[in-house]
Amino acid sequence: MKSRDRIFVNGKIYQTPFVSPVDAIRIRKGKILCLGSFSDVLCGPGNSEIVNLEGATVLPGFIDSHNHMMTYGLMKKQFNCRALEDRNSRLLKRKLREYAFSCEGSSWVLGYNFNESHVDEFPDKSFLDSIIPDRPVLLVRSCTHSALLNSRALEILFPNALFENPKNGRMGRRSSGEPDGWLYEEALEEALVRIHSMDSAGVFRALKSAQEDYLALGLTGVHDPGTDMISKKGYVGYYLDFEKRGLLKIRTYLMSRISSSAPITTWLYEVKRLEDEKTERGSLLRLGGVKLFADGSIGSRTAALSAPYEGSAENRGLLKNMDELKGQMEKIHKARMQIVVHAIGDLAVSEITRCFGEILEAYPFRDHRHRIEHAEMCDVQVIREMKRLGLLVTVQPSFIHDFGDDYRKGLGPERAARLIRCRDFLEECLSFSIGTDAPISSPSPWENIWAAMVRKTKGGIPLGLNQSISLAHALDAYTAQAAFAGFHENECGSLSPGKEADMAIFEENPFLLSPEELPGLKVKYTVLSGNVVYAKDS
């Protein structure tokens, strides 16, 4: 039987955020055939099914270009410290004890979104020992670049910690040399991989749960830059199996991390082979960028800065070995694969930009689309150099709201006001996309868009208002620019004829709402390749 076209009518349908809406759109075999007035679309050839939008607004499906979907799903059942942000140590202790009691079946007590500034005084392992002394406890900081452990957890993970440091990363210590319970960077990654020896069923449940949440937010695409909770090889393998079982319902662009268990060239060859195979099949899953790290985070005071953090004259953060990192970047570039580098501090961003420049001069490659993730601190000259080199940037405006008050404390008001320079990116014509970095921030696109427009900290302090952008530009960064960053611009990112019919449908028109109303905007339908994958009332 010949398939029927599906025609959505009686709505406000935006092909892109920059053009006036049309009334109707015709979809054939999952792709957009045409759009325009009701009469023009209805008179097209072929049998059709009519879907009445009843005045709803249709936008291209959102693509979160930096979102740890697997980590988000795995963490959903852990203790969320963010719910306790009132500097009430007594409440935190009570809630953590209650959580530990509720998960007695597991030896470990795990939490996330911990922020030491929400505790009365800077905590160390003794703080957690006073709450749960007999079971291992690990609370991942909100930035995910550090964590606080109790004494029992340290004994299990690092039995020789009194005399030895982790092979990579850093372990915090008291003045006596005794570990204080804090782990930073690769030391935390090592700990998490050892803790999370999960079976595939548990990972699949986590991915399904995260995917359901994301579809309900209007997300039709995600760029997942890896997880610290599962081995690098396991991360890719679980996604491959998840799709093979027919469970994947969202376009997923994986940024794999280099496996230390295999030579880099072998690892890159395997990833490239899998990507070529999946591209040929028209898969929802793509294996694209290779993720590297240049520094840490501002919250953990490990982002690499050109000038010290406020109140800490000796601390400029942690910058990775640039010669070693450049060597990895060069191998990835020669393999004609996308390089994706985490760089937050101004020193890290400028050094990574320099490395890109040297590599591209030695080995020119026109459409590389190499990316810098976050690029929170950079001056205009560095932005211009990024543009010249054809680099892309992914930013998280929601960090301004979620962590802006801490940024002001760690960097000072002047430097903090120059963070996440979306307006400068626009003015210098540097392509940038927007992501949430969930679970670090909420996966809600509208909360992120609101933050890009308003730029207020959680404490209500404006932070760099001259870097705010319009709703249309924020939506463009969430759709067309995100698709471009993942080499998907011919498939999605706008509602154009020939592209997949990926749509986010809302009862209200965001262009008629104030910025403060945007975070409350609810999805009516999410559509992937013409099929409804989420309905509000279902």
Image (cartoon, helix red, strand yellow):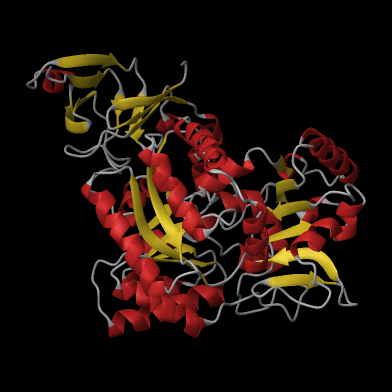
Q: Nearer the viewer, residue 453 or 24?
A: 24
| Coordinates of residue 281 in the picture (x, y in percent) | 23, 45
User: In the picture shown, does residue 100 fall above or below 27?
Assistant: below
- Is residue 491 visible in the rendered image? The answer is yes
User: In the picture shown, does residue 252 fall above or below 126?
Assistant: above
| Coordinates of residue 271 in the picture (x, y in percent) | 35, 61
> Which residue lies at the image location 43% right of the left edge and 63% below the top edge?
424
Q: Is residue 167 left or right of residue 254?
A: right
Q: Is residue 35 left or right of residue 130?
A: left
Q: Quadrant of the N terminus?
A: top left
- Is residue 120 visible in the rendered image? The answer is no
Q: Is residue 277 left or right of residue 536?
A: left
> Which residue lies at the image location 62% right of the left edge and 51% below the top edge?
197
Looking at this view, name the residue that lies furthest to the left.
Answer: 45
Q: Nearer the viewer, residue 197 or 154?
A: 197
Residue 335 image-quadrant placement: bottom left
| Coordinates of residue 278 in the picture (x, y in percent) | 28, 49
Q: Nearer the viewer, residue 220 or 199?
A: 199
> Which residue lies at the image location 71% right of the left edge and 58% below the top edge?
406
| Coordinates of residue 145 in the picture (x, y in percent) | 64, 61
> Which residue lies at the image location 60% right of the left edge and 62% below the top edge?
417
Q: Is residue 522 left or right of residue 17?
A: right
Q: Nearer the viewer, residue 287 or 108?
A: 108
User: In the picture shown, does residue 381 fall above or below 53?
Assistant: below
User: In the picture shown, does residue 213 fall above or below 186?
Assistant: above
Looking at the rendered structure, the number of numbered marks drawn on it comes to 0
Looking at this view, name the residue that lies furthest to the right.
Answer: 130
